[in-house]
Amino acid sequence: MIRQEDLSFEGKRVLVTGAASGIGAAMARAFSAHGAEVLLADRNEGGLHAIQDDLGGVSHTFVYDQQRIDEVVKLADTVGCVDVLANNAGIVTYGPVVGQDAKTIETVIQTDLIGPIVLAKSIARPMLEARQGVIINTTSQLAFCGAAERAVYASAKAGLAQFTRSAAAEWAPYGVRVAAIAPGRTLTPLNENLLAGEEARANALATIPLGRFGAADEMARLVLVLASDIGSYVVGHSLIADGGYVIAQ
């Protein structure tokens, strides 16, 4: 039986990165609606304040750039001990591998893999001392299958999925759970370029057995469940939420 208190985050501090829009903003709303003190982090200061206003001003905002390790570490030091980290911030690039310069590749790997790892291990330190805490990473369906013109992004997300498994094995004995969601094509600002135009949208939909794109709220609800007492026995798993894209490959 699922009890209402199983999804309660009353008295809990939750850090959400990439909180200014898309899935991160939906996560912030979901955790706030279930009683959490939400800490919003993103490089988009205006977007953060908009979400803060949307939540009634009860949250806290932190501006940082995940490409910069010093800012990632500073964020962790500033927020201190939290009960949940929704490690969600990321970027995506499109195009043939041979057409991407070294700087672009470095930026994607830094933002989507190195930054999340550094943040997770920094946030984990006080969690491990307290012997409790949950870290939910955001990977991607492309961590589990190939995709033309998204090789660098897919590689970074696959690395994050493997980090999820490995960190979970290391930290679970100390009471810290690590898991992940792997969203498919979700209607967010991050996917606007991919889904721009009727033909592009039709081609994308044709690859999804369920026949529709995901919604940010759907991904946020999964994170809420994984971070809650309902997901208390889920360790190291990346929950793929893609409408069937991966199984159809």
Image (spheres, rainbow, N blue to C red):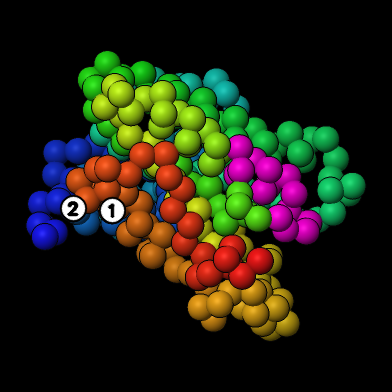
Residue at image mark 1: 225
Q: Tell me residue 185's x, y (percent).
A: 57, 65
Above or below, 212 against 179 in this view is below
- The one nearer the camera, 224 or 50, is 224
Is residue 78 visible to the viewer in this orientation of the structure?
Answer: no
Instruction: Place residue 142 in its image quadrant.
Output: bottom right
Q: Tell me residue 182's x, y (percent).
A: 50, 53
- Labels in figure, total: 2
Q: Around disc 2, counting alpha carbons within 10 Å, would you say few (fewer than 14), some (14 to 19), or many (20 or more)?
A: some
- The one nearer the camera, 102 or 48, is 102
| Residue type at tag 2 | Leu
Q: Tell me residue 124's x, y (percent).
A: 37, 24
Above or below, 130 against 210 in this view is above
Residue 123 drawn in magenta: no
- Magenta residues: mostly which secondary structure? helix
Instruction: Place residue 174 in its image quadrant.
Output: top left
Q: Secondary structure at mark 1?
A: helix
Q: Is residue 170 left or right of residue 64?
A: left
Query: Which residue is at 57% across, 66% downward?
Result: 247
Tell me if label 2 and label 1 are in contact, CB under 8 Å.
yes
